[in-house]
Image (tube, rainbow, N blue to C red):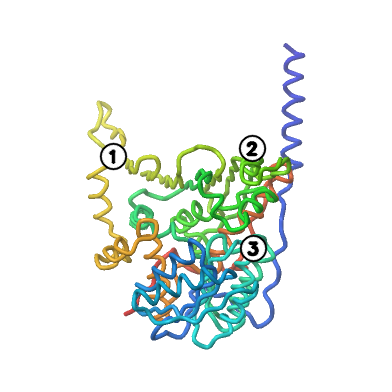
Amino acid sequence: MRIKALLFSVALIAAVSCGTASKTIKTRIPARPAGQENVLGLTAEPLDVVRIGVVGLGRRGSFAVERLSYVPDAVVTALCDIEPDRAEESLAWLKSHGRPEAAVFAGKADSWKQLCERDDVDLVYICTDWVNHAPIAKYAMEHGKHAAIEVPAALNLDEIWSLVNTSERTRKHCMMLENCVYDFFELATLRMAQDGVFGEVIHCEGSYHHNLDKVWENYWHGWRQDYNRKHRGDLYPTHGLGPVCQVLNIHRGDRMKTLVSMDTKSFNGGKMMERFTGEPCTDFVNGDETTTMISTQNGKTILIEHDVLTPRPYSRMYQVVGTDGYAAKYPVQQYCLRDYGAADGGARFIPDEKIYSGAELSALQDAHPNEILTPELVALAKKVGGHGGMDFIMDYRLVYCLHHGLPLDMDVYDLAEWCSVAPLSALSIENGNAPVEVPDFTRGAWNRVDGFSYSFAK
């Protein structure tokens, strides 16, 4: 027994020692350049009509052109793609639907610069391949334009800090087009959380589980496969992370503090590449499954997962856990609330759970309406579409805020925080799943705004 006890003590000491030796990795937070201020609550001059230049006219970009054509107080004035045929197709769509003719820029890798330099563009709407997102947005802001960028808006910390600094310096909006924060269940649950339905929210979960077998070939010249082939970490975190960050008031009273990530080895990536290229692939580095845990300054937690290579059914997880309630979107939408029923023999109220689904779920949501979902907007969103309407709501809110000179629903710090999980998760994984400190991209202003909210014209 003494030998067993001794061995246990040695093992415990070794475990504690290993834990102590595991230092939190910190990344550099550059000092704010002289003369710059944060852009929390940033406003710009109202725009009678928001004139939009769309760069990148593949599937997302061409659909964006169509949606934007239905948004009040917006007009597409310029189109750009490296492939001339794509630009001409979007131009033809505008003409066939009675929309004003747009200028076209195409055929060169940097044709987007001409679009950014035009006087009839207020907002550059960027839907290119990932590696061009940040450079185009930075150039747009430097030429007096607001920037809206498809996800992920930036791929590494240098790009992220560059966008933050450029937005602060130019005082131009820089928003990531994270559509999932505008899905109907997420909007309803956010309002319910703000109304205290779940008590205090203490834990959230999100993911991007999406088997991409049928759509890999849609990415022009294989750019998305190539990026997954060369990079580890959660490369596409924002769909799962964005909605829960709004619930948790990230940089509006709380902040992501530390993350730890781990991944499986790549079982399916190389096989996928071989199917499309016909050549053996032994250097695919992104794991089939990546898991990231995040702690916040206020002692709360977030779980984020990424999986685009297994047959797991589509899911963004989206779970909200509060002291008195719970919300889940996948695989079945439901709410579960603490219910204090009748007292037992000891005169203690025994909490039970009341599960809401179906009609009861809808009634509960109706009792806590999200203020942006007016009947008119919901009807128009469902008519125009875009992932069930959430894409249109995103476009509508972006234009609405620019038209009225209001702060946007998402700012450059949201962009920075949500995108940072990709490089930070890679840093954790490549250092033996070490904890990594999440930078405060607001540089000290994370608790100056009291909670997430929308802006409206008076």
Q: CA distance from mark 2 to mark 1?
A: 40 Å
Give coordinates of residue 239: x percent, y percent: 49, 54
Quadrant of the snapshot with the C terminus: bottom left
Residue 181 located left or right of residue 22: left
Residue at the image point whose x is 72% and y is 62% from the top? 28
Between 419 and 434, which is closer to the camera in this rendering? 419
What is the crowding at mark 1: few (fewer than 14 residues within 10 Å), some, or many (at least 20)?
Answer: some
Determine which quarter of the picture holds residue 131.
bottom right
How far apart marks 2 and 3 lie (CA) works out to 25 Å
Secondary structure of the residue carrying numbered label 1: strand
Pair 2/1: label in front: 2
Whether residues under marks 2 and 3 lie with C-beta atoms below 8 angstroms apart, the answer is no
Q: Are marks 1 and 3 in contact (CB under 8 Å)?
A: no
Query: Which quadrant would the N terminus be assigned to in this image?
Result: top right
The residue under label 3 is 131
Identify which amino acid the numbered label 1 is placed on: Asp
Q: Position of residue 392 (x, y in %)?
A: 38, 65
Amino acid type indicated by mark 3:
Val
Give the labeled residue for mark 1: 339
Seen from the viewer's position, the closer of residues 143 and 62 is: 62
Looking at the image, tell me whether mark 1 or mark 3 is earlier in sequence order.
3
Element type at marker 2? Answer: loop
Mark 2, residues whose alpha carbon is within 10 Å: few (<14), some, or many (≥20)? few
| Residue visible at 74% across and 45% down in the picture | 431
Q: Is residue 431 left or right of residue 450?
A: right
Residue position marked by numbered label 2 in the rendering: 264
Please provide percent x and percent y for residue 223: 63, 56
Kind of residue indicated by mark 2:
Thr
* Label 1 to label 3: alpha-carbon separation: 50 Å
Tell which circle, 2 or 3, labels the residue nearer the N-terminal end: 3
Vertical side of 7 occupied by 458: above or below? below
